[in-house]
């Protein structure tokens, strides 16, 4: 019985699908390395890795409760445990609360600014599911929630967010809109039928161009980050790797095939990894 519940909870919190955690983790680690001017302390590394996993898992539980009346009508989400009745909404919210409290305990060694940013980040992430009901570009709102690990990393290390931190934050906003629009392209027909909003619906036939424009803006801002931090060829190599990922995604999404768009979305973990690897390698080789 307990084993069965734990399996359901792992599905609720997407522990079986780590792609979401990686999409959050790579930019957070990139920020942590830059803020620390090299490898961070073991304490900061543990706090942000574990915190990212906990908060992503809590966010999935909250999202599934908010979307329980819609998920059953969408092909990709029909078997989610709340929508299918295997986990009650109250139970899912309790799981989310426990995970959020566990993440809050991780903030104890950190400073007040980091705590304040965490509170704002949680508020944005928790309210995101509601924005899909009325806001025409909910991916932009999600991008704010998914990027909060960046200023938090700078705040934790430096007790302030430097201009580089805000450049990185802004670059990440465009990246999130790019990959979540690819994700929304998978569900576009279902979302139109049940009345949800998404960037894929808003952009219409300009969806592919909009995704590539967001990749372009992200990569351009990452050049600013690299120049500001005086990174060398390792960072450039990572940047080129990310550019290659973006071009590959264009090949996948240009036909607007559902499965291909989903593959593009999932492949974004390598875009984020390429930038992090470039930053980490640059510091390692100094």
Image: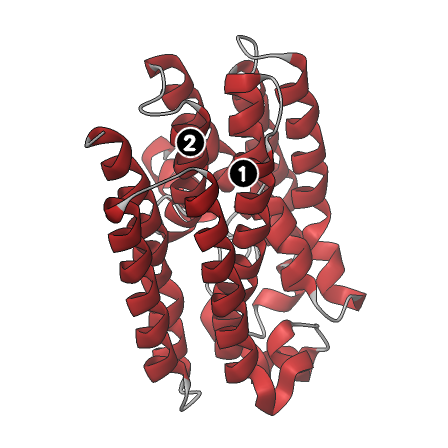
- Residue under label 2, please give it: 34
The disc, 2 or 1, on the residue closer to the chain's N-terminal end is: 2
Quarter holding the N terminus is top left
Image point (29%, 44%), residue name: 232
Q: Which mark is residue 271?
A: none
Nearest the viewer among 266 and 82 is 266
Proximity of marks 2 and 1: CB atoms separated by less than 8 Å: yes
Q: Is residue 127 above or below residue 163?
A: below
Q: Position of residue 279 (x, y in %)?
A: 32, 40
Image point (38%, 80%), residue name: 250
Task: Check the image and name the residue furthest to the left.
Answer: 285
Image point (70%, 43%), residue name: 124
Quarter holding the C terminus is top left
- Element type at mark 2: helix
Q: Is residue 90 left or right of residue 239?
A: right
- Residue under label 1, please give it: 164
Q: Is residue 131 left or right of residue 24?
A: right
Q: Residues within 10 Å of mark 1 (few under 14, many from 20)?
A: many
Q: Is residue 260 above or below residue 125?
A: below
Nearest the viewer among 161 and 42 is 161
Residue 88 at least partly seen: no
Residue 56 at least partly seen: yes
Image point (46%, 63%), residue name: 79
Distance from disc 2 to disc 1, alpha carbons, whole Å, reads 9 Å
Specify the color scheme: secondary structure
Q: Position of residue 30 (x, y in %)?
A: 40, 38
């Amino acid at each position: 019985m307990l084993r069965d519940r734990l399996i359901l909870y792992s599905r609720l919190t997407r522990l079986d699908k780590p792609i979401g955690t990686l999409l959050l983790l790579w930019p957070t680690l990139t920020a942590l390395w830059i803020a620390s001017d090299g490898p961070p302390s073991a304490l900061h590394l543990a706090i942000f890795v574990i915190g990212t996993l906990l908060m992503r898992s809590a966010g999935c539980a909250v999202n599934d409760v908010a979307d329980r009346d819609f998920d059953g009508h969408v092909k990709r989400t029909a078997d989610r445990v709340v929508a299918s009745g295997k986990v009650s909404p109250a139970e899912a919210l309790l799981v989310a609360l426990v995970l959020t409290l566990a993440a809050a305990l991780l903030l104890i060694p950190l400073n007040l600014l980091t705590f304040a940013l965490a509170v704002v980040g949680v508020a944005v992430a928790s309210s995101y599911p509601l924005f899909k009901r009325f806001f025409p570009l909910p991916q932009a709102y999600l991008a704010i929630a998914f990027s909060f690990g960046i200023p938090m990393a700078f705040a934790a290390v430096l007790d302030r967010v430097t201009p580089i931190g805000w450049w990185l934050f802004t670059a990440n906003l465009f990246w999130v809109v790019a990959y979540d629009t690819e994700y929304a392209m998978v569900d576009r027909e279902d979302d139109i039928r049940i009345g949800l909003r998404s960037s894929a619906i808003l952009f219409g036939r300009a969806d592919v161009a909009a995704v590539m424009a967001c990749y372009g803006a992200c990569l351009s801002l990452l050049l600013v980050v690299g120049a500001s931090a005086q990174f060398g060829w390792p960072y450039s190599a990572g940047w080129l790797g990310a550019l290659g990922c973006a071009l590959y995604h264009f090949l996948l999404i240009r036909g607007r095939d559902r499965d291909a768009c989903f593959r593009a979305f999932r492949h974004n973990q390598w875009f984020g990894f390429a930038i992090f690897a470039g930053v980490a390698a640059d510091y390692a080789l100094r």
